[in-house]
Image: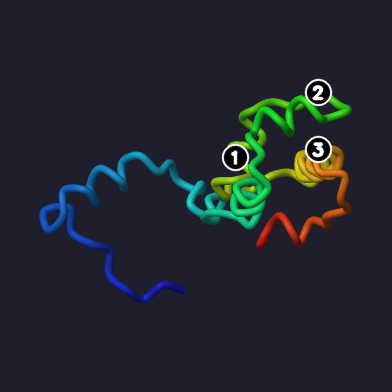
Amino acid sequence: MNTTPPLEPAACPAVAVAQRRIPAGTADRNLGPQPIAQLLAALNLKPHDLVAASPVPMTHKMVARACKGRRLTPNTQSIVLNALNKATGKSYTLPDLFAY
């Protein structure tokens, strides 16, 4: 249980805006930047490279959500993993890409 009091909107206008934008129940789905984002940067790959390499239908939004830390379904995680493995010719695992 979180015991810290919520920030007062009057104390920080940005907090008030942020509190309005996050729908109830979605805070636990945003997990922060994931290792896949660093991996793509290190390999000089763009999201389109994964979309083009994917053997199954895949969207740019799936890659964007994976990189920014949006919680993905196991199916979407496997699609992203398989696309990265095909694009690089290496064999990565889910823990290499996601920190959750």
Check residue 50 in the rendering and tell me which mark sits there, or answer none.
none
Dot 1 or dot 2: first in sequence order is 2
- Which element is circle 2 on? loop
Residue that carries the numbered disc 1 in the rendered image: 65
Q: Is residue 5 left or right of residue 91?
A: left
Separation of marks 3 and 2 at Cα, in angstroms:
15 Å
Label 1, residues with CA under 10 Å away: few <14, some 14-19, many ≥20: some
- The x, y position of residue 15, in whole percent, is 24, 52
* Residue 61 to residue 31: above or below: above
Q: Is residue 48 left or right of residue 30?
A: right
- Which element is circle 3 on? helix
- The x, y position of residue 51, in whole percent, is 73, 28
Q: Is residue 47 left or right of residue 32?
A: right
Marks 3 and 2 close (CB-CB < 8 Å)? no
- Which element is circle 1 on? helix
Residue that carries the numbered disc 2 in the rendered image: 57
Residue that carries the numbered disc 3 in the rendered image: 87
Label 2, residues with CA under 10 Å away: few <14, some 14-19, many ≥20: few
Dot 2 amino acid type:
Pro
Q: Quadrant of residue 55?
A: top right
Dot 1 or dot 3: first in sequence order is 1
Separation of marks 1 and 2 at Cα, in angstroms:
16 Å
- The x, y position of residue 4, in whole percent, is 32, 74
* Residue 94 to residue 21: above or below: below
Dot 3 amino acid type:
Ala
* Residue 46 to residue 68: above or below: above
Marks 1 and 2 close (CB-CB < 8 Å)? no
Dot 1 amino acid type:
Arg
Report the residue at 22% width, 47% height from top. Answer: 16
